[in-house]
Image (cartoon, rainbow, N blue to C red):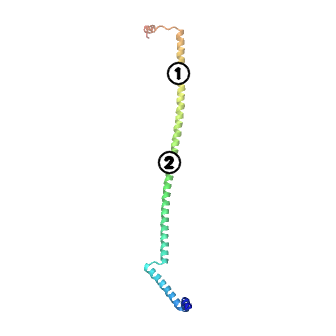
Amino acid sequence: MIDLAEDAPSNSLLRLGAQPIALTAVALLLLIVGVTSIAIWRAYTGAAPETDRVVASRQLQVRAAQASEQLVEKTKGLEATQQESIDQLQVVQDQLLTMKRLLASQQADTKRLSEQVAGLNESIDGLRQSFASARANEADTSSVTPRKPARHRHASARKRPRS
């Protein structure tokens, strides 16, 4: 009997293997229940994976289009800003050129006026020298010929008859 008790578990396995139709029917029933439950779940949630993928891809396309439009707008804004900067730079360059011309003109005027002042200084120095030499000559001639006192000069000038 001990032998029979040990054979009992292997006997039950042999018994299940002996009825493969029942085993297949149970497996098929489990498979049908699983597929049906998945179909019911998808129908209940209302979203199939394919629909989810299509919706997700469309959302990505919309986001990409929005991002592209934003980039185009920003690019146009940058172009406008760059053009304004170029225009302002051109105005500043024109002003700088005008200032350079004015500065060159002023420098030329300053140089001309400096040359004229130098010429005037030379003329003044020449006049001073000639005036100093004239005084020196006058002093030399006055020391050689004695002068009458100032009273006598005025008195002789009064005595002369006027004609």
Q: Position of residue 138 (x, y in %)?
A: 53, 14
Circle nearer the N terminus (2, 1)? 2
**Contact between labelled residues 1 and 2, with CB atoms less than 8 Å apart:** no
Q: Position of residue 152 (x, y in %)?
A: 45, 7
Query: What residue do we see at 49% from left, 70% from top?
Result: 60
Q: Nearer the viewer, residue 18 or 56?
A: 18
Q: Secondary structure beneath disc 2?
A: helix
Q: Which residue was labeled with disc 1?
A: 128
Image height of 50 relative to 120, above or below: below
Q: Quadrant of the N terminus?
A: bottom right
Which kind of residue does numbered mark 1 sit on? Answer: Arg
Q: Nearer the viewer, residue 47 or 105?
A: 47
Q: Position of residue 163 (x, y in %)?
A: 44, 11
Q: Secondary structure beneath disc 1?
A: helix
Image height of 139 relative to 36, above or below: above
Q: Which residue was labeled with disc 2?
A: 92
Q: Nearer the viewer, residue 71 or 103?
A: 71
Q: Position of residue 91 (x, y in %)?
A: 49, 49
Q: Residues within 10 Å of mark 1 (few under 14, many from 20)?
A: few
State the mark number for residue 19: none
